[in-house]
Image: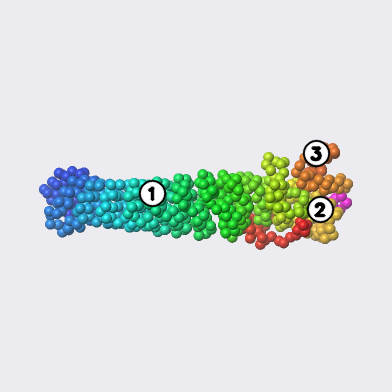
């Protein structure tokens, strides 16, 4: 019968206490003279052997094993040596966990099960590895411990754990006996673990032993990707130097590369190394995603600047299907929302990013002019006549103005077409964008469209008409105005019933000669031989701007609905034609 008389909730038997203290004489006296039981257990299921092994007392372990051999107990010595605590821990496990080399050796001689698993799937070797007990690991490996068995819920091997903990000396032992390509439940190898946790010395050891550098986890991530993501420069350098491929696609959702991972987390030094090693097809290929998208999404300004300096295109490829955005600029505009002064936007605009329908919709379909003002600070709207001839891309980027602290790029014909197209679709926001565009030199005649005249607010319509010769409108446009006046949907200015006065005709002619862009955006008017009091008049500054009333909801106006994808924009935009469409 087991003796439970000395078991308490918070203590152990006197025999176990003596074993714990390492006092061999006291232990022998209790067992021999008082008949103390060596298998009396506490509330953890620990007996005297567990205590002696955990304490590292080889003498007490020997004394207990001798006593068990002398007594004709109901259990054999082998059974007793392999008895387990409530957590499934053997005496050998407890000794190995604490690095008690001599005790482990003694227990193995007594036929301790070297591969006994605990309740949480650990074992003596795994415990020794975990705590970095090199000599114990050497002993267990030499005695035939299973080195490739999986442990823990994640199915890690001893090699995984040694690498994770950075026990390089133990890794050096294990690489000679372990399966280097053993995988856990996510198909992660030990080399992947080394890259993930920045264990560069372990990584070097594994590669020297022949471990695969381009192994991929279940989600297709590679060691190079994870090292780039976590910012482990030394590991990235080692991997690239040993043949890691930076062009392996590392995601099942979209073609992610290590370059993207470094950009997402702003690891500039790693990014510099990867840019030199990565195929530039990722920048423009339709099947790829430019890393600019990732840098913009993560608001990594330094990375964006580096990409642009290294020649990555500010326009990249259309990623509507993959990411929901047609260009890096569209993504930057979408993210701008409450921070139109975003450095990301400024960098892209300064680099000459083109604006299409989606980009202009973000800029114009809003009740503020913050984004539009920012764009116009980098863009020059040329006079209509100069848009009649198509310019090559290189010419397009060379054509710049120097009236600001930075260079301004002239919009191309298609960009102006898209601008007018979107503007005509966003008449409900015209009280905001119309004054800004006209001040920026947009030819107002481009907006003399039936939809504009038929739908614009009275103040907006009155403002626009004062920039043109209203008496020279085409009959169809005049008819629209007459109908609106009759329906009382337009509160027109009284002078629209009259022929424009000579002063109005003169300033329209001056604008025609100089060009709206030059007149509105330069100091040319100050150089004309006219009194200075006329300068504001010639630049149409005497015309009162429409009040910025918050417009009614628009299909593309709300923040969540507006801009998730260019497809959404195109579905709600009407097929308007402006005078530019005839060019």
Q: Which residues are magenta?
A: 492-500
x and y percent of residue 407 in the render? 69, 43
From the top left corner, tell me how far across and down residue 273 is, in percent.
51, 47
> Which residue is more in the foreground, 280 or 197?
280
Q: Nearer the viewer, mark 1 or mark 3?
A: 1
Mark sitting earlier along the chain (3/2)? 2
Instruction: Point out which mark residue 205 bears.
Output: 1
Residue pictured at 70% horizontal, 50% vertical: 396
Asked if one can make out residue 126 in the rendered structure from this viewpoint, the answer is yes
Instruction: Kindly check if marks 1 and 2 are in contact, taking CB atoms under 8 A apart as contact.
Output: no
**Is residue 76 toward the left or the right of residue 364 in the image?**
left
Q: Which mark is residue 526?
A: 3
Say how many tags the image has: 3
Residue pictured at 35% horizontal, 56% vertical: 179
Q: Nearer the viewer, mark 1 or mark 2?
A: 1
Ranked by sequence position, the earlier of labels 1 and 3 is 1
Badge 2 element: loop
Of the numbered discs in the image, which one, if any, rests on residue 492?
2
Please identify the quadrant where the N terminus is shown: bottom left
Most extreme residue toward the left is 33
* Mark closer to the chain start, 1 or 2: 1
**Residue at 14 percent of width and 54 percent of height:** 69
Q: Give the distance between the C-alpha atoms of the residues marked 3 and 2, in whole angstroms.
A: 32 Å
């Amino acid at each position: 019968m087991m003796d439970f008389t000395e078991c308490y909730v918070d203590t152990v038997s006197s025999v176990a206490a003596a074993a714990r203290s390492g006092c061999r004489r006291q232990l022998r006296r209790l067992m021999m003279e008082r008949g103390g039981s060596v298998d009396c257990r506490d509330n953890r299921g620990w007996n005297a052997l567990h205590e002696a092994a955990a304490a590292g007392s080889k003498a007490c372990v020997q004394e207990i094993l001798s006593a068990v051999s002398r007594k004709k107990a109901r259990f054999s010595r082998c059974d007793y040596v392999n008895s387990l605590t409530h957590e499934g821990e053997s005496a050998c496990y407890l000794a190995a966990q604490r690095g008690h080399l001599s005790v482990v050796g003694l227990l193995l001689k007594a036929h301790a099960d070297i591969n006994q698993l605990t309740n949480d799937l650990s074992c003596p070797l795994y415990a020794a590895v975990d705590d970095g007990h090199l000599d114990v690991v050497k002993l267990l490996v030499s005695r035939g411990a299973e080195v490739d068995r999986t442990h823990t819920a994640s199915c890690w091997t001893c090699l995984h754990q040694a690498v994770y903990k950075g026990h390089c000396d133990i890794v050096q032992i294990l690489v000679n006996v372990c399966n280097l390509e053993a995988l856990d439940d996510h198909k992660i190898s030990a080399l992947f673990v080394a890259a993930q946790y920045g264990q560069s010395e372990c990584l070097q050891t594994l590669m020297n032993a022949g471990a695969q550098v381009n192994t991929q986890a279940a989600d297709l991530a590679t060691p190079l990707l994870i090292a780039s993501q976590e910012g482990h420069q030394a590991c990235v350098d080692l991997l690239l130097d040993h043949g890691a491929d930076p062009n392996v696609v590392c995601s099942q959702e979209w073609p992610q590369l290590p370059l993207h991972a470094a950009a997402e987390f702003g690891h500039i030094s790693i990014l510099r190394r990867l840019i030199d090693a990565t195929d530039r097809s990722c920048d423009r290929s339709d099947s790829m995603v430019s890393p600019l998208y990732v840098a913009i999404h993560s608001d990594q300004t330094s990375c964006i600047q580096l990409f642009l300096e290294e020649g990555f295109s500010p326009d990249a490829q259309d990623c509507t299907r993959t990411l929901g955005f047609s260009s890096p600029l569209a993504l930057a505009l979408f993210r701008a929302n409450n921070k139109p002064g975003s450095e990301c936007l400024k960098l892209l605009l300064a680099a000459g990013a083109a604006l299409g329908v989606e980009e202009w919709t973000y800029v114009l379909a809003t009740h503020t002019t913050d984004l539009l003002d920012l764009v116009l600070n980098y863009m020059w709207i040329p006079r209509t006549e100069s848009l009649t001839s198509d310019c090559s891309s290189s010419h397009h980027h060379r054509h710049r103005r120097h009236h600001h602290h930075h260079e301004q790029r002239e919009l191309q014909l298609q960009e102006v077409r898209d601008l007018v197209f979107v503007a005509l679709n966003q008449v409900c926001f015209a009280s905001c964008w119309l004054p800004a565009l006209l001040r920026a030199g947009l030819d107002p005649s481009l907006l003399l469209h039936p939809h504009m005249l038929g739908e614009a607010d009275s103040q907006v319509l009155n403002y626009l008409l004062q920039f043109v010769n209203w008496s020279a409108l085409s009959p169809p446009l005049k008819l629209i105005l007459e109908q609106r006046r009759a329906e009382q949907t337009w509160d027109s200015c009284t002078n629209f019933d009259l022929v424009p006065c000579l002063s109005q005709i003169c300033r329209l002619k001056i604008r025609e000669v100089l060009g709206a862009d030059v007149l509105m955006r330069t100091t040319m008017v100050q150089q004309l031989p006219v009194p200075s009091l006329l300068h504001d008049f010639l630049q149409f500054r005497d015309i009162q701007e429409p009040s910025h009333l918050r417009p009614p909801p628009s299909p593309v106006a709300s923040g969540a609905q507006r801009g998730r994808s260019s497809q959404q924009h195109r579905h709600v935009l009407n097929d308007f034609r402006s005078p530019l469409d005839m060019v």
